[in-house]
Image (cartoon, grey):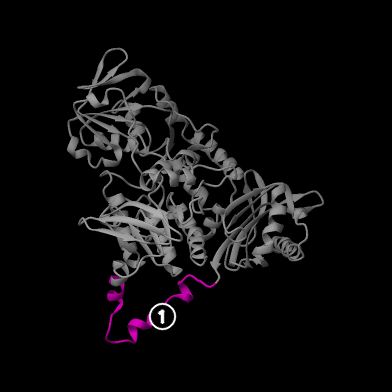
């Protein structure tokens, strides 16, 4: 470690702690353009403040946060000089105490005339909750109930009783057993929160297992670990869906997650301090549970969106949404139209082609195309900016929206150069491409709208070569009994239509589950709010006792801790 960097970071942290303790103005410690992002430690919420707000909000929140002991975090990446958004900054990971527990954070210092160093970014997050240490490492259970007691119920007996809920209700009901629901349940379990996960699928992992035959993850395994249990080091970079499904099943068992498969969440109504949730099990029996909190973890991709396409009801062949598509082998020799050019549309088209179908894709809107190698690999690598995944997660969380947007533009510009030949070839066959409205690329598309991009694993080359056909929606007229009629009067014959048309908004999904009043009370879910935080995600909503979690593996791993802390705190409220 360079002693000057260590001394510089320590001096800034000492000044912050001293000024906060004296309730003095901290504005002099911050640059004119600065951002403070807090996850629960000061605000009890997920919040970002910018420029003139930072000093005032820090001072105001300190009255209840009572933060102290700011110091360089032991065992983490030491202070270092890094390039962030074309700025050279001193980046330091620090730790502190606060009323809610212990915290961890990141500060980025920039040099100003003088010379002096001020903060451009400050990030603070609750790391351990007072009174509820995570039951891991030195806090792990001893197991004395099983090792020293003979007679009476053993570990398995207690597990069966716990997950049956014959005589008690869960404190938290999580609806959805994908990566977001399981990651949260694992976190809550280590905080001593009685949690039940319900899913319409029979087995953990079925949300991956039952998807199309050729599916694999399109991003690298090293950023996809789930909490407490990283993937084996022997696993491939890109994980096949059935391998991942088996891991989910093992994860539920290893983390002692209470999971009810084959269970439909029918409806719920909120009373004075808890929900009345109605469930239907696969055997037809019904249960009414009364949890204090419900978390919707059905993901960004929830209810399939089926657009009203002219004439589709008249089509004489089979119509299936991509969410229900499973295996191209069943469609060998068929003529297939795939409507949509996002990830699912491309993957389904490639799978059908590989199984001997004649495939044509219908492009409805411009699509961002990113190569798996080298562009997507570059994006994955850009996340791993620290020696450990734990520190990379901290750094990833610490980046406020304005800087996230700048970084996305810079990364996208590099991707455009790397993929220039591929994209030009696609444009040459009439395939329309873009990099988002503001050139921020596929990740921002995912965060803003949940789709609109394709990570190329080979289908782009099939389109370019003509092995998979392409037509523009603007050149189509309507579906007819034997296919899709074009505006020039010709008909594209088809036996099967696959609708890779995406999913309805989560607010509409909530409307189906809990009705108009709750959906309208909560408002839009996903996408960014005016602070640059994801709307109604991993935080309290306007509906008491209702929470949401979703996202890719990295988001589920990091934000599950943030949400679990808030739920644990909420359970202690009157």
Range shown magenta: 131-160
Q: Residue at label 1?
A: 142
Q: Name the image quarter holding residue 2.
A: bottom right
Does the segment drawn in magenta span residue 108? no
Q: Name the image quarter holding residue 128.
A: bottom right
Q: Is residue 319 left or right of residue 293?
A: left
Does the segment drawn in magenta span residue 140? yes
Name the one closer to the observer, 476 or 246. Answer: 476
Q: Name the image quarter holding residue 205.
A: bottom left
Asked if residue 116 is positioned above or below residue 141 in the image, the reply reads above
Name the one closer to the observer, 234 or 199. Answer: 199
Q: Is residue 92 visible?
A: yes
Q: Is residue 450 left or right of residue 462?
A: right
Q: Residue at x 30, y 57 (%)?
A: 204
Residue 30: x and y in percent read: 73, 52
Name the one closer to the observer, 199 or 459. Answer: 199
């Amino acid at each position: 470690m360079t002693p000057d960097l260590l001394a510089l970071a320590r001096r800034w942290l000492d000044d912050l702690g001293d000024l906060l303790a004296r309730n003095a103005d901290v504005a002099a410690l911050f640059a004119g353009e600065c951002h403070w992002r807090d996850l629960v430690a000061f605000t009890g919420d997920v919040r970002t403040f910018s420029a003139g707000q930072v000093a005032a909000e820090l001072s105001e929140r300190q009255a209840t946060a009572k933060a102290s002991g700011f110091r360089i975090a032991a065992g983490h990446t030491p202070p270092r000089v890094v390039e962030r958004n074309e700025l050279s900054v001193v980046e330091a990971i620090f730790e502190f105490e606060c009323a809610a527990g212990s915290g961890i954070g990141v500060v980025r210092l920039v040099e100003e005339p003088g010379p002096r160093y001020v903060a451009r970014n400050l990030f603070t997050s609750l790391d351990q909750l007072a009174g509820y240490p995570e039951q891991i490492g030195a806090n792990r259970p001893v197991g004395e109930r099983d090792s020293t007691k003979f007679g009476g119920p053993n570990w398995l007996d207690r597990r069966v009783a716990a997950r049956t809920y014959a005589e008690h209700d869960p404190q938290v009901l999580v609806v959805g057993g994908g990566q977001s629901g399981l990651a949260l349940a694992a976190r809550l379990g280590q905080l001593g929160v009685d949690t039940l996960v319900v899913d319409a699928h029979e087995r953990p992992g079925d949300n991956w297992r039952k998807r199309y035959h050729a599916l694999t993850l399109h991003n690298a395994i090293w950023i996809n670990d789930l909490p407490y249990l990283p993937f084996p080091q022997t696993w491939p970079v890109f994980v096949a869906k059935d391998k991942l499904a088996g891991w989910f099943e093992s994860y539920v068992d290893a983390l002692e997650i209470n999971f009810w498969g084959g269970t439909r969440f029918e409806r719920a109504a909120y009373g004075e301090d808890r929900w009345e949730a109605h469930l239907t099990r696969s055997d037809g029996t019904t249960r009414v549970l009364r949890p204090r909190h419900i978390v919707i973890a059905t993901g960004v991709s929830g209810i399939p969106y089926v657009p009203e396409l002219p004439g589709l009801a008249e089509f004489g062949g089979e119509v299936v949404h991509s969410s229900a598509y499973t295996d191209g082998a069943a469609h060998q020799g068929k003529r297939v139209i795939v409507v949509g050019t996002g990830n699912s549309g491309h993957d389904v088209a490639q799978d059908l082609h590989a199984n001997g179908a004649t495939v044509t894709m219908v492009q409805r809107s411009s699509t961002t195309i990113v190569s798996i190698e080298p562009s997507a690999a570059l994006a994955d690598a850009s996340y791993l900016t620290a020696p450990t995944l734990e520190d990379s997660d901290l750094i990833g969380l610490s980046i406020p929206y304005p800087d996230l947007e700048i970084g996305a533009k810079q990364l996208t510009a590099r991707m455009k150069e790397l993929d220039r030949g591929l994209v030009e070839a696609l444009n040459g066959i009439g395939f329309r491409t873009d990099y988002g409205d503001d050139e921020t690329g596929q990740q921002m598309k995912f965060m803003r709208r949940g789709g609109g991009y394709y990570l190329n694993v080979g289908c782009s080359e099939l389109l370019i070569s003509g092995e998979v056909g392409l037509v523009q929606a603007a050149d189509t007229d309507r579906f007819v009994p034997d296919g899709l009629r074009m505006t020039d009067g010709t008909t594209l014959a088809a036996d099967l239509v696959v609708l890779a048309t995406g999913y309805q908004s989560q607010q509409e999904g909530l409307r189906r589950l809990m009705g108009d009043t709750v959906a309208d009370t909560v408002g839009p879910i996903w996408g960014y709010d005016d602070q640059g935080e994801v709307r109604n995600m991993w935080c309290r909503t306007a509906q008491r006792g209702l929470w949401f979690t979703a996202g890719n593996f990295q988001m589920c791993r990091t934000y599950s801790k943030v949400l679990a802390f808030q739920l644990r705190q909420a359970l202690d409220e009157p």
